[in-house]
Structure formats: C-alpha cells, structure tokens
Amino acid sequence: MNRSVLITGGNRGIGRAISEAFLKAGDQVAVAHRSDDELPDALNLRCDVTDTAQVDAAFTAAEAAHGPVEVLVSNAGISRSAPLAAMTEDQFSQVLDTNLTGAYRVARRATRGMLRLRRGRMIFISSVMGGAGLQGAGNYAASKAGLVGLARSIAREYAGYGITANLVAPGLVRTDMIEEMPEGMRRHLVDRTFLKRAAEPDEIAATVLWLAADGSRYITGAEIPVDGGLRLGA
Ligand SMILES: NC(=O)c1ccc[n+]([C@@H]2O[C@H](COP(=O)([O-])OP(=O)(O)OC[C@H]3O[C@@H](n4cnc5c(N)ncnc54)[C@H](OP(=O)(O)O)[C@@H]3O)[C@@H](O)[C@H]2O)c1
C-alpha cells in the first residue's frame, strides 16, 4: 500500500494506533493534531479541527508531501461531561465544534482531492454512546449521533464518485479519554461489556484498516460496532 492517508488526532490514543497500523501497511501517513506530542515516521501537522484555515493548511501540506488524500480518518474528539442541568453552552458547543463540525470541516476539505481522483475512503470514529446516550455526556452522545447522519449523507452524495463513507463505533477503549471518566462510570461500562474489559486502541485500528482496504470497497454508509458487546448492554 502507498496511499495518502490523513488521520485527525493521529498522535495519541486510538488515532495513534490507527496511524501506526497504516504506517505498518506501507501507507504515507499525515497526522493532524494540536499538541507537541508527535508520532515518529508520520508527517505531523499542527491543526486544530475547530479552525477551517488550519484544516485547509494541513490538507495542503499533506497533499504536497503525499499527494491528494485518498483515506481520511476523522478521529479527533473530546469530552466535556456534565449533567444537562449543569452543562454550560460552552461545554456543549466545544464538544460539537470538535467532534461533529470538525469532522464536517475535514470531510469537506477531503472531497476536493477525492473528487479529482474519483475515489476515496472516509472513516469516522463515532461511539456506541451515539446511539445509546451516555449519562452526564449529552453533548458527547449528540456529537457522535450527528456523525452517523453526516457520514451517511456523504455516502449517498458521493457514491457516484467512488467515495465511500463509514463509521467505526467503539465502546470503551483504554486511552487518556477514559482516564477523565469517573471510576464508577468506567466500572459500570465494563460490567455491561460482554467481554468485561475495555478495548486496546489497536483493536479499533484493525477495523479501520480493514474498512480502508480494497476488499471493503462495497461497504458504504455502515457503522461497525467494535465494542465487546457494550451496545447490547446488560
Ligand atoms: N476512548 C474511548 O473509550 C472511546 C470510545 C468511543 C469513541 N472514542 C472516540 O475515539 C476518538 C479518539 O479518542 P481517544 O480515546 O483516542 O482520545 P484521546 O486519547 O483523548 O485522543 C484524542 C485525540 O484527538 C486530538 N484532538 C482533540 N481535539 C482536537 C482538535 N480540536 N483538533 C485536532 N485534534 C484534536 C488529540 O490530539 P491533541 O491533543 O494533540 O490535539 C488526540 O490525538 C474520539 O473521537 C473519541 O470520541 C473513544
């Protein structure tokens, strides 16, 4: 493989495992993130997905180094949890702006190269919580549910141009993000997971790599759960 791949939030957690999997497959990987935490062997691009100009600059740099982006993994995400009565508009809109509008910004910019190539794969990292809801995190769940509508609309709009759009919906994954979660909530979610543990990031990356592979060319508009059974609950 020698595809031009761009992964938002590709420097840490799930995104890092996804980036490493594409690098291992021989692809040319650009990772877009805000912090100094860089991923060796990848093209590290400073890019906050809440800023349209930074998104545009990151794609321009990736295109100059690797050619038009053929595989986009929209993974960057945050959580800012609070019960609804205490959730500020800032908390709500920061999460939506990063997780959902950020995905729209990168997907829109990616269409430019993909339409020219007349092929492309867009893969969005949603969450089992998008469908199920998550107590104390309505902003997060709403952002992930919104991704489903976005990805399926893209799948419809661009199928004729050889572009597919799919989602991977993890359950609980061992990253910094779940460190911020109250211990009681984490235990409750592990208890509801059939496999009785959180996933390792590489267990999510394997599905993303598979969705980007040639053999998955007939899959579009799908949301693939990788959640150890959590969505079915107890
Ligand atoms: N962990 C879980 O249990 C779980 C479950 C389901 C879904 N997910 C989803 O999986 C994705 C990755 O989560 P994770 O667990 O790996 O979280 P994480 O360890 O906290 O990593 C988040 C990543 O997103 C990047 N990021 C955050 N805001 C950004 C912004 N405005 N612009 C660019 N990059 C930004 C971060 O990089 P910088 O800080 O360097 O910017 C980092 O690479 C998220 O969409 C999350 O919602 C996670």
Image: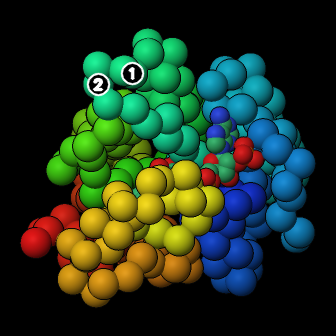
Could you say where residue 139 lies in the image, as x and y percent from the top left?
A: 36, 31
In the displayed orientation, state which residue is furthest to the top: 89
Residue 201, quarter of picture: bottom right
Residue type, numbered disc 1? Met
Q: Which residue is mark 1?
A: 87
Could you say where residue 138 lies in the image, as x and y percent from the top left?
A: 30, 33
Residue 224, quarter of picture: bottom left
Could you say where residue 217 lies in the image, as x and y percent from the top left?
A: 36, 68
Identity of the residue drawn at 28% across and 66% down: 188
Q: Which SS class for mark 1? A: loop
Identity of the residue drawn at 30% across and 84% down: 196
Task: State whether residue 219 is above or below residue 193.
Answer: above
Residue type, numbered disc 2? Leu
Task: State whether residue 165 is above or below residue 205.
Answer: above
Q: Which residue is mark 2?
A: 84
Q: Are marks 2 and 1 in contact (CB under 8 Å)?
A: yes
Whether residue 116 is visible here, answered yes or no, is no
Any mark on residue 56, and which?
A: none
Dividing the image into 4 quarters, which one contains the C terminus? bottom left
Horizontal side, residue 139 vs residue 113: left or right = left
Label 2, label 1: how many angstroms apart (C-alpha)?
5 Å
Within 10 Å of disc 2 (Cα), the crowding (few <14, some 14-19, many 20+) is few
Residue 18, quarter of picture: bottom right
Identity of the residue drawn at 44% across and 62% down: 183
Dividing the image into 4 quarters, which one contains the N terminus? bottom right
Could you say where residue 9 lies in the image, as x and y percent from the top left?
A: 66, 50
